[in-house]
Image (tube, grey):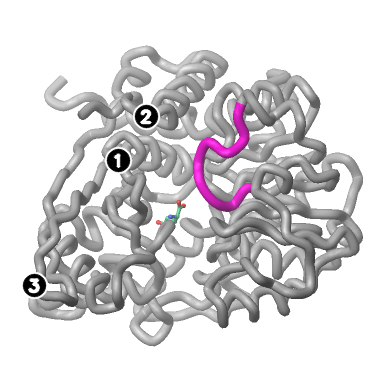
Amino acid sequence: MDFSEGQMFRDTIKILEEAANVINCDPNVLERMKRPKRAIIVSIPVRMDDYRVKVFSGYRVQHSSTLGPYKGGIRYHQDVSLSEVAALATLMTFKCSLLNLPLGGGKGGVRVDPTQLSRTEKQNLTRRFTSELGTAIGPDVDIPAPDMGTDPQTMAWIMDTYSQEVGFAQPGVVTGKPVEIGGSLGRAGATGLGVVFTTEKALETQKKKIEGTTMVIQGFGNVGQHAALYAHQRGAKVLAVSDVTGGIVDMKGLNVPDVIKYVSEHKVLKGYPKAEPISNEELLTLPCEILAPCAMENVITGENAGKIQAKFVIEGANGPCTVEGSKILHERDIVACPDILANGGGVIVSYFEWVQGLQHYFWTEDEVNAKMKLIITSAFDKVWELKTEKKIDMRTAAMGQAVRRLERAMLLRGLYPR
Ligand code: GLU
């Protein structure tokens, strides 16, 4: 098992090296940035509903705590691997750095298909995983959050298990909790709203508006649904959306609230009666202004990037474009807003949730959204400035700004013992 087994980790390091080169990063510091500080691998025995015990593999990779406690989600998916979690942890470090948050980067994952678990099995798995992680997580140490396959309920179980073990309520151990137990207003929709704020900023660079624009969204989980809804509310036409069961299209624009209602009742998009079916691959190449990949990594590749007709790609997911895919988009003058910027709304509001919890003082949803907008739009401006100055793509520029802040912090703190 090695960090660099998977393409996403290798691609993340390539982007990091390129960005470090652009900003003349100290080579000793870069060496350290390329490796996660710590990786924890646990076996999670779970009592299944039929009384059998199954053992799952769980990971928590802690990439950097230079800027603050490790921060990042926990993913439940059948393809989770150490290498993937390490790539995602690395991205979290640079996401938090770019967004100027006092947080480091981490990520967790369990190799399991959560759709095959009952609620009880998912709870058993979550509680045992939390217990196996022990004091490696904590409000000042490492703060998990939802990611693919996990949700506010999962965070509630983590919070409860951790609190039971330390003996008192510790809401600060996770973010993305239900509001009733210390979650923040606005957290559930934060990543999708951030995707829309980024879209508006990207359109602005070409003097365009979101109202009347056309948008295609790949992935219809928490991020995709909220991005679609907020874009729809601002007058964008959402032409097509997709999930693992395939996509739906209506070139006149989907009735997004109706699609969301259908998915909440049927769990999947398949069978939605008021639009035409379309495959995930066809959806990516539809003519539109904005394409927002909000599902998995490695979706836009060297193979299909040449066929994309969108003018803007807004990365709601982590790592949806491979390095090769990104290069082709850049050559074709397609503006691609990278993950560490475009999907940063989630971790920004996670940061707000953590702060509100520590202060025992909670903000209104309008306050949360306005403060998030301020952070994500100023990060966009910083990225745009470096992109324009160095004539590079937005991914390298975003990584460049993130590396700059972390480099300064690492040099100031120095290397222990020397
Ligand atoms: N999983 C989300 C991400 O990839 C959120 C992380 C967090 O809120 O800590 O950014």
Predominant SS of the magenta segment: loop
Q: Earlier in the sequence, mark 2 or mark 1?
A: 2
How many residues crowd mark 3 within 10 Å: few (<14), some (14–19), many (20+)? few
Is residue 299 a member of the stretch shown in magenta? yes
Looking at the picture, which amino acid does disc 2 mark? Gly
Question: Residue at 64% of width from left, 80% of height from top?
Answer: 261
- Judged from the image, the secondary structure of the residue bearing numbered disc 3 is helix
Name the quarter where the C terminus is drawn: top left
What residue did someone put label 3 on? 165
Looking at the picture, which amino acid does disc 3 mark? Glu
Horizontal and vertical percent position of residue 110: 27, 53
How many residues crowd mark 1 within 10 Å: few (<14), some (14–19), many (20+)? many
- Judged from the image, the secondary structure of the residue bearing numbered disc 2 is loop
What residue did someone put label 1 on? 81
Residue 174 vs residue 383: left or right? left
Is ligand 1 within 8 Å of the beta carbon of the residue shown at mark 3? Answer: no
Which residues are the magenta region?
Answer: 293-301
Q: Kindly check if marks 2 and 1 are in contact, taking CB atoms under 8 A apart as contact.
A: yes
What residue did someone put label 2 on? 6
Question: Residue at 27% of width from left, 38% of height from top?
Answer: 82
How far, Cα to Cα, is label 2 from label 1?
8 Å
How many residues crowd mark 2 within 10 Å: few (<14), some (14–19), many (20+)? some
Looking at the picture, which amino acid does disc 1 mark? Ser
Instruction: In the displayed orientation, state which residue is furthest to the bottom.
Output: 180
Is ligand 1 within 8 Å of the beta carbon of the residue shown at mark 1? Answer: no
